Amino acid sequence: MATDEPNVSIGDVSHSTFAIGSHAHAESHHGTAIQRDQAAEELLKAVRELRADLTRVRATGETATLDEALAETEDEITRTGQAGPSRLDRLRQLLTDSQALVGLIASAGAVAGLLGL
């Protein structure tokens, strides 16, 4: 008995991504997660915390620039497992230039600690 159905043959599909059908969607997540050393993990955590703290202060050009640099650092560590020397130098300079802001956030943390928050 003959059919008019086309024949489809799929060989080895390991490590492949494909979708079939008019509304099909294929998404691939191959590979392993980027490995980060302890220093990179600590920096990533501190960067995320500082970004969160920046949302609690009045936005200025200085805070926007610092947040942008922090976002770029977070992205680089997430993608590559580390932040490059030039990225770290830029953050150091921005934090040095933002000593009043850094002092405000640190003092707010100290007050919150004393209040038992």
Image: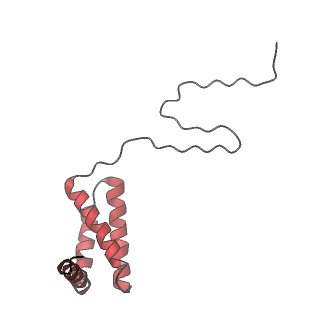
Which picture quadrant has residue 90?
Answer: bottom left
| Residue in the image at 65% along x and 37% along y | 20
Q: How many numbered badges does the structure rendering display?
A: 0
**Is residue 37 depicted above or below 10 in this figure?**
below
Identity of the residue furthest to the front in this view: 116
Relative depth, front residue between 53 and 10: 53
Foreground residue, 111 or 46?
111
- Looking at the figure, which quarter contains the C terminus? bottom left
Give the residue furthest to the top. 1
Left/right placement of residue 78 relative to residue 30 reads left
- What colouring style does the render use? secondary structure
Task: State the image quarter where residue 2 is shown.
Answer: top right
- Identify the residue at horizontal 34%, vertical 60% (top origin): 76
In this picture, residue 66 sits left or right of residue 24: left
Residue 4, image x, y percentages: 82, 23
Residue 44 sits above or below residue 112 on the image: above
Asked if 80 appears above or below 9 in the picture, the reply is below
Image coordinates for residue 41, horizontal then vertical, percent: 25, 57
At 27% across and 57% down in the image, what residue appears?
82
Image: 99 above or below 5: below
Query: How far across and down, in percent of the image, does residue 93 sit?
Result: 24, 77
- Looking at the image, which residue is at 27% across and 78% down? 94
Q: Quadrant of the N terminus?
A: top right
- x%, y% of residue 89? 23, 70
Identify the image quadrant of residue 86: bottom left
